[in-house]
Amino acid sequence: MFEKFDALIGEDDKISKDDLMNVLKEELIVVSVFDLMIISAEIIENNKYVQKSYQEKSKKIYVDSFINRVNEIRSNDTVYDDYFNRDDFVEKLNNLKDIFKLVSKDRKNKSSIISFVVSLYTTFVLDEPIHPIGTPFPGSLEVIMENGVYYCPVKEANIDTPNSVCRLCIAEQLDF
């Protein structure tokens, strides 16, 4: 899965957002509408473990951030004239590879592909946090943006979790 992403890493200090978008779209070719339906059902099923007061908002945000982002990436025809830092990309790509090794031991599935593609898209193309603004977390806390900086209430608590994408996320820890 990572060969195309590895190919983006050249000698330059920067990587083109357009080049990354091309790879992201190629990776999503294997994801069908049926896969999206199954993943959507899994999100809804897993949502029953979320605290009742957060369930509706959580379900909507997770479906939007996974399913709708796939469609957004596929239909994105924006021409990006900017670049992102190569070293940052290499570090975060290596983190994704580690996560993929853990996940693929149990099952190699389309939700992993979507998670990785969406994580790279939000981090490097959109310059946004992986969990969208408003994502609820226990304690009535959520991902927010203040003065152009994104904050997450659970980043530090999950940064060392082996299968967490928090290490990739641009959000800072929310002080509460």
Image (cartoon, grey):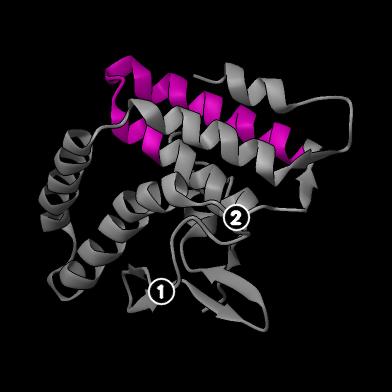
User: Residue placed at 58% from the left, 35% from the top?
Assistant: 22
Residue farthest to the bottom, as pictured: 147
Q: How crowded is mark 2: few (under 14 residues within 10 Å), some or many (20 or more)?
A: few
Work out whether residue 161 can be spotted. Answer: no
- Badge 1 marks a residue whose secondary structure is strand
Q: Is residue 61 left or right of residue 15?
A: left
Q: Is residue 59 above or below residue 151?
A: above
- Residue 103 sits in which quadrant? top left
Task: Give how far apart the Cα atoms at labels 2 and 1 are.
Answer: 29 Å
User: Residue placed at 41% from the left, 23% from the top?
Assistant: 102
Label placed on residue 78: 2
Q: Does the magenta stretch include residue 82?
A: no
Label placed on residue 96: none
Q: Which residues are drawn in magenta?
A: 87-114
Q: Mark 1 points at which residue?
A: 142
Q: What residue type is labelled 1?
A: Glu
Q: Which amino acid does label 2 sit on?
A: Thr
User: Residue placed at 34% from the left, 25% from the top?
Assistant: 30
Nearest the viewer among 142 and 11 is: 11
Q: In this view, does 8 lie above or below 83?
A: above
Query: Marks 2 and 1: which is nearer the front?
Result: 2
Work out whether residue 150 can be spotted. Answer: yes
- Residue 33 sits in which quadrant? top left
